[in-house]
Image (tube, rainbow, N blue to C red):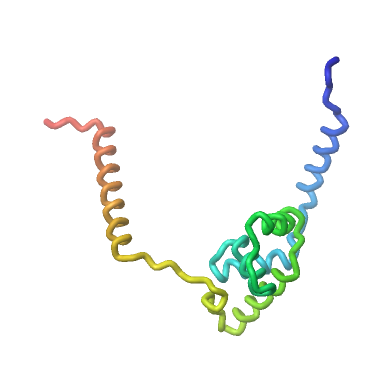
Protein backbone atom coordinates (compact mmCIF):
# COMPACT_ATOMS: atom_id res chain seq x y z
CA UNK A 1 0.00 0.00 0.00
CA UNK A 2 1.35 3.36 -1.03
CA UNK A 3 0.92 6.40 1.18
CA UNK A 4 -0.03 9.56 -0.69
CA UNK A 5 0.45 12.89 1.05
CA UNK A 6 -2.73 14.79 1.74
CA UNK A 7 -3.14 17.77 -0.54
CA UNK A 8 -5.52 19.35 1.98
CA UNK A 9 -2.70 19.65 4.49
CA UNK A 10 -0.45 21.18 1.81
CA UNK A 11 -3.06 23.76 0.80
CA UNK A 12 -3.82 24.67 4.44
CA UNK A 13 -0.13 25.27 5.09
CA UNK A 14 0.19 27.38 1.95
CA UNK A 15 -2.94 29.35 2.88
CA UNK A 16 -1.60 30.04 6.37
CA UNK A 17 1.76 31.08 4.94
CA UNK A 18 0.17 33.46 2.43
CA UNK A 19 -2.05 34.96 5.12
CA UNK A 20 0.98 35.59 7.33
CA UNK A 21 2.66 37.37 4.43
CA UNK A 22 -0.38 39.53 3.75
CA UNK A 23 -1.25 40.19 7.41
CA UNK A 24 1.93 39.82 9.45
CA UNK A 25 1.52 39.41 13.19
CA UNK A 26 2.35 42.50 15.14
CA UNK A 27 5.02 42.09 17.80
CA UNK A 28 3.45 42.83 21.20
CA UNK A 29 4.68 45.94 22.99
CA UNK A 30 5.81 43.81 25.93
CA UNK A 31 7.98 41.75 23.59
CA UNK A 32 9.58 44.90 22.25
CA UNK A 33 10.16 46.20 25.76
CA UNK A 34 11.93 42.96 26.74
CA UNK A 35 14.13 43.13 23.65
CA UNK A 36 14.90 46.81 24.20
CA UNK A 37 15.63 46.36 27.92
CA UNK A 38 18.01 43.48 27.23
CA UNK A 39 19.77 45.57 24.58
CA UNK A 40 20.12 48.44 27.05
CA UNK A 41 21.86 46.07 29.45
CA UNK A 42 23.87 44.66 26.51
CA UNK A 43 22.97 41.06 27.27
CA UNK A 44 21.01 38.36 25.45
CA UNK A 45 17.30 37.99 26.02
CA UNK A 46 17.90 34.52 27.48
CA UNK A 47 20.29 35.99 30.05
CA UNK A 48 17.69 38.71 30.69
CA UNK A 49 15.20 35.96 31.62
CA UNK A 50 17.70 34.52 34.09
CA UNK A 51 18.34 37.90 35.70
CA UNK A 52 14.60 38.56 35.90
CA UNK A 53 14.08 35.23 37.67
CA UNK A 54 16.85 36.01 40.14
CA UNK A 55 15.42 39.50 40.77
CA UNK A 56 11.89 38.22 41.40
CA UNK A 57 12.38 34.85 43.09
CA UNK A 58 15.85 35.29 44.58
CA UNK A 59 17.34 32.23 42.89
CA UNK A 60 18.34 31.05 39.44
CA UNK A 61 16.85 28.07 37.64
CA UNK A 62 18.60 25.62 35.31
CA UNK A 63 18.72 26.38 31.59
CA UNK A 64 16.47 23.38 30.86
CA UNK A 65 13.60 24.85 32.86
CA UNK A 66 14.24 28.36 31.54
CA UNK A 67 14.00 27.10 27.95
CA UNK A 68 10.29 26.41 28.31
CA UNK A 69 9.61 30.01 29.38
CA UNK A 70 11.92 31.38 26.70
CA UNK A 71 10.38 29.27 23.92
CA UNK A 72 6.91 30.47 24.91
CA UNK A 73 8.24 34.02 24.64
CA UNK A 74 9.89 33.47 21.26
CA UNK A 75 7.20 31.50 19.50
CA UNK A 76 3.96 32.61 21.15
CA UNK A 77 4.82 36.02 22.61
CA UNK A 78 3.93 34.90 26.14
CA UNK A 79 6.05 36.83 28.63
CA UNK A 80 6.24 35.74 32.26
CA UNK A 81 5.23 38.37 34.81
CA UNK A 82 8.67 38.46 36.38
CA UNK A 83 10.32 39.23 33.03
CA UNK A 84 7.77 41.93 32.28
CA UNK A 85 8.47 43.46 35.71
CA UNK A 86 12.22 43.61 35.11
CA UNK A 87 11.79 45.10 31.63
CA UNK A 88 9.61 47.87 33.06
CA UNK A 89 12.13 48.48 35.82
CA UNK A 90 15.05 48.70 33.35
CA UNK A 91 13.12 51.02 31.02
CA UNK A 92 12.16 53.30 33.94
CA UNK A 93 15.76 53.48 35.13
CA UNK A 94 16.85 54.27 31.57
CA UNK A 95 14.30 57.10 31.33
CA UNK A 96 15.59 58.50 34.63
CA UNK A 97 19.18 58.24 33.38
CA UNK A 98 20.28 56.05 36.27
CA UNK A 99 20.56 52.63 34.60
CA UNK A 100 23.65 50.78 35.81
CA UNK A 101 24.12 47.19 34.55
CA UNK A 102 26.22 46.43 37.65
CA UNK A 103 23.07 46.83 39.77
CA UNK A 104 21.74 43.69 38.08
CA UNK A 105 24.94 41.70 38.51
CA UNK A 106 26.20 42.31 34.99
CA UNK A 107 29.95 42.74 34.74
CA UNK A 108 31.88 43.89 31.71
CA UNK A 109 34.74 41.60 30.81
CA UNK A 110 37.92 43.63 30.48
CA UNK A 111 40.71 41.94 28.53
CA UNK A 112 43.99 41.42 30.32
CA UNK A 113 47.22 42.85 28.85
CA UNK A 114 48.25 39.33 27.81
CA UNK A 115 45.00 38.88 25.91
CA UNK A 116 45.50 42.22 24.13
CA UNK A 117 49.06 41.31 23.13
CA UNK A 118 47.95 37.91 21.87
CA UNK A 119 45.13 39.54 19.89
CA UNK A 120 47.52 42.01 18.25
CA UNK A 121 49.86 39.17 17.22
CA UNK A 122 46.98 37.20 15.74
CA UNK A 123 45.88 40.23 13.70
CA UNK A 124 49.45 40.82 12.46
CA UNK A 125 49.80 37.17 11.44
CA UNK A 126 46.45 37.21 9.63
CA UNK A 127 47.40 40.39 7.75
CA UNK A 128 50.71 38.81 6.72
CA UNK A 129 48.88 35.69 5.55
CA UNK A 130 46.46 37.80 3.48
CA UNK A 131 49.37 39.75 1.97
CA UNK A 132 51.18 36.55 0.99
CA UNK A 133 47.98 35.09 -0.46
CA UNK A 134 47.34 38.27 -2.50
CA UNK A 135 50.93 38.20 -3.74
CA UNK A 136 50.60 34.56 -4.80
CA UNK A 137 47.35 34.98 -6.69
CA UNK A 138 48.42 38.20 -8.40
CA UNK A 139 50.76 36.31 -10.70
CA UNK A 140 53.66 38.70 -10.04
CA UNK A 141 56.72 37.81 -12.06
CA UNK A 142 59.97 39.66 -11.41
CA UNK A 143 61.68 41.19 -14.43
Task: Name the residue at the left extreme.
Answer: 143
Question: Position of 76 compared to 53: left or right?
Answer: right
Residue nearer the viewer, 92 or 12? 92
Question: Position of 100 compared to 133: left or right?
Answer: right
Q: Residue at x 60, y 84 (%)?
A: 96
Q: Quadrant of the C terminus?
A: top left
Residue 126, image x and y in percent?
30, 47
Q: Is residue 125 above or below residue 105?
A: above
Question: Position of 111 compared to 78: left or right?
Answer: left
Residue 138, image x and y in percent?
26, 34
Q: Residue at x 83, y 16 (%)?
A: 2
Question: Position of 130 compared to 17: left or right?
Answer: left
Q: Residue at x 26, y 43 (%)?
A: 131
Residue nearer the viewer, 56 or 141? 56
Residue 93, image x and y in percent?
61, 81
Task: Name the residue at the right extreme.
Answer: 8
Residue nearer the viewer, 100 or 6? 100
Q: Is residue 95 above or below residue 35?
A: below
Q: Residue at x 24, y 30 (%)?
A: 139
Rendering quarter of residue 73 = bottom right
Residue nearer the viewer, 5 or 136? 5
How many numbered marks does the figure carry?
Answer: 0
Residue 17, image x and y in percent?
78, 42
Rendering quarter of residue 89 = bottom right
Q: Quadrant of the N terminus?
A: top right
Rendering quarter of residue 81 = bottom right
Amino acid sequence: MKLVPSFGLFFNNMKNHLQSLIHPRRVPDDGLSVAFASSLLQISEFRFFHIAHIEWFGNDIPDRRMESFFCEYLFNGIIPFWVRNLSRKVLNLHKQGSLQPADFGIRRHVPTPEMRTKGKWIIIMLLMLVAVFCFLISGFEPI
